Amino acid sequence: MEIEKSKINFFVNNTVPEIKKIYTIRSRQSRLKSFKAMKYLYWAHLGKEITKFGFYLTAFSSTLFIILTLFYVKEKIGSYRYLLLLLPITGFFLASFEYMLDSFFHCYNHALVHFRFTSFQSLSYEVNTSFLSFFPGLYGATISTLALQFVYRYWLIFQPHNIHRFFDGPRLIFPVSYTLFTGATWFSGSILFTRLDSKCVKYLEKEILNCYGLVLAEQPALAFVAYDNNGDLRWESLVGMGSMSSSMTFQYAIIIYCACIMGLKMQEKIAMLSSKSQRMHRQFYHALVIQITAPSITLFSPVFLLFFAPYLDIEMSFPGIFMSASACYPAMDILIMIYMATFYKNALIDFLKTVLLMNRGTTQKIKSVIQRYQETQMNTVTTRATRPDN
């Protein structure tokens, strides 16, 4: 009996730790292999960090721009002052939703999928999926604000009577309604025509599992597959993508038309104005051109290619990390306007002076409080020292 116990103790003390060690090594190796198998998970994490940076940058620049526009811009720019506020407002909501949703894009052969890594536990699957459609809606609304600014500058120079008709006073509801309508067009095209069905799940589930370690059927996701199993176009996907791309094409058509006409004929129209007014018109025009050119090259072109890549019908698999950078787009436009417009630079200088004066005043108040406290303590010590002993 004692021999059997000694054998058991020997096995427990020597063999079991070795088995545990081997099991630990194998489990680590299997986890490492599974992580390596998820080949695009690194890009997803990188995209999340880019979105986070874009959110904070947009939140800061939007707040700064609103403060400068409402309280520090001294030039009389009329209703354009309030039209300028549409960009930071829509841009902030765009960056906030993108950061909050924790979503990512992936392109695979003739399919594009937009899925979330996490979801709101207190909400249903349908509601969590619907939140994904707010992203393209806000994306479209943000682009429409730039088109409206081009229209305003064009009408101010060539058809000033339209400014009073559509922008002044309560009529500002027209550009606001246009922005909401454009956003609703993108939202509707997304939520109605890109919902997951059994064919989308069957086509994409293995790819998403291998690349990101997610079960697609369990995640809130939207997708469009350009072709069916027979190689024919899927009309629901075509209609959804067509509605959004048509809206974007319309916005760009407005921008290009207004920009070209102003570039060719603006100088002769503003020649009769004062030098200060001429300079303001040119600064607004140059700022708008750069605002649309820089994002178009750095953000919109890759996004455009991402949207239409599935129709090429070629074998491919790549993460849509370009879309993560869209959270930086509103901040980019705001900073361009502050840099290009002289009166915004002056407003920024006045704002910084105010902040510095406030800090200086606060520092002086703190110093006076500390000084009074020290004097009180010295008086207390002096009183105790001069008090006669009982």
Image (tube, helix red, strand yellow):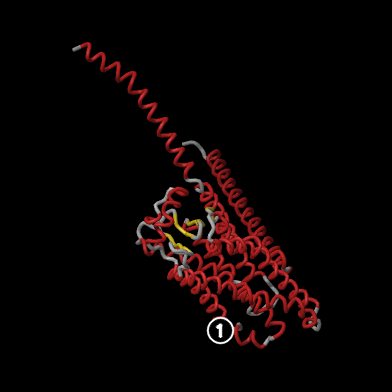
Q: In which quarter of the image is residue 148?
A: bottom right
Q: Could you tell me if residue 254 is visible in this image?
A: yes
Residue 105, percent across and down?
50, 57
Q: In the figure, 321 relative to 156: above or below?
A: above
Q: In which quarter of the image is the N terminus?
A: top left
Q: In which quarter of the image is residue 253?
A: bottom right
For the image shown, how many numbered marks are present on the structure? 1
Residue lying farthest to the front in this orientation: 230
Residue 53: x, y in percent? 57, 54
Q: Where is residue 346 shown, x and y percent of the image?
A: 72, 66
Residue at figure coordinates x 30%, y 16% from the top left = 10
371 in relation to 156, above or below: above
**Residue extending furthest toward the top:** 3
Q: Which of 358 and 344 is in front in this view?
A: 344
Question: Is residue 224 at all visible to an observer of this figure?
Answer: no
Q: Residues within 10 Å of mark 1 (few under 14, many from 20)?
A: few
Q: Which residue lies furthest to the left in this view?
A: 1
Disc 1 element: helix
Q: Which is nearer the eye, 151 or 79?
A: 151
Q: In the rendered view, does 163 fall on the left or right side of 195?
A: right
Going 64% across and 70% down the picture, which residue do you hit?
69
Q: Quick check: 14 left or right of 151?
A: left
329 vs 350, nearest the viewer = 329
Q: Where is residue 86 in the image (x, y as percent from the top left)?
A: 58, 72
Decide which of 314, 248 is in the foreground and name it.
314
The amino acid on which the numbered mark 1 sits, given as a three-letter code, is Pro
Q: In this view, does 130 lie above or below 21?
A: below
Residue at image point 60% right, 68% down:
66
Residue that label 1 marks: 170
